[in-house]
Image (cartoon, grey):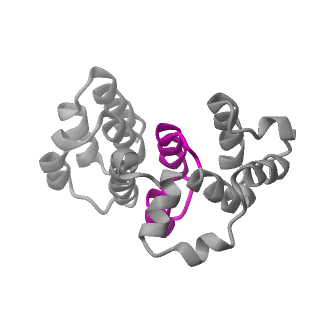
Amino acid sequence: MAGLRVLIAAGRADWLAGMTRGPEVLSRLAQAVGRYEDQASYADGHVRWSLYRAAMDTPAAWPLLFEAVAREPDGPLASAVVGDVLERVPKDARERWIGLLPAAVRGFSARRARELAVLESLGRDDMSAEAVGDLIDGWSDWLQRRAAEASTDREVLRVVSRRGRTKRIRQAAVDALRRG
């Protein structure tokens, strides 16, 4: 319900009027991903997580997943779903997904969206090694690890190999340098 309050507060009540009721949207989501209806209940968060994971792997089910997350009563579960979805949806759809979340659990997904933008920039070699050197200490371990995997810029990889927070991150950058 908290996600619904966010949409209503943002003036989205007209959009919500067309949305399906909670249990019904879960049933429709289960059908869309080939699950049984007994796997579409608000009674068990683990069952919903499994259903949501299947829906994340089925782009045609994303509109129903969006509705289900908007109605998700468990904020941390909704945040986990949105955090995973952000890597799959187009960049211009990310803010819409983040907007579903109550403010109390929005921070992780907002940060992940910013990190994905950095990662995409690294993947296009649009970020200089100097910029990486200035920013890397503020990056999460996740972003540093992914930067070592995504970048093909040897100077960026050298920065990550020297300044990565963990041995695993530094080694991933060294391995990428050896491959490239």
Q: Is residue 160 left or right of residue 35?
A: left
Q: Is residue 87 visible?
A: no
Percent of width and height locating residue 117: 36, 58
Residue at point 74%, 54% (across, down): 25
Percent of width and height locating residue 67: 64, 59
Is the residue 34 above or below the residue 28 in the image?
Answer: above
Percent of width and height locating residue 106: 38, 50
Q: Is residue 116 visible?
A: yes
Q: Is residue 25 left or right of residue 96?
A: right
Is the residue 41 above or below the residue 98 in the image?
Answer: above
Q: Is residue 15 left or right of residue 26?
A: left
Residue 88 included in the magenta stretch of the image: yes
Residue at point 60%, 52% (across, down): 71
Residue at point 29%, 46% (across, down): 154
Q: Is residue 9 left or right of residue 159?
A: right
Residue at point 78%, 53% (across, down): 24
Query: Depth check: 178 or 70 in front?
Result: 70
Which residue is farthest top?
Answer: 167
Query: Depth check: 118 or 8 in front?
Result: 8
Is the residue 144 above or below the residue 64 in the image?
Answer: above
Q: Quadrant of the C terminus?
A: top left
Percent of width and height locating residue 88: 56, 54
Residue 133 included in the magenta stretch of the image: no
Which span is picked out in magenta? 72-100
Q: Main secondary structure of the magenta part?
A: helix
Query: Depth check: 124 or 34 in front?
Result: 34
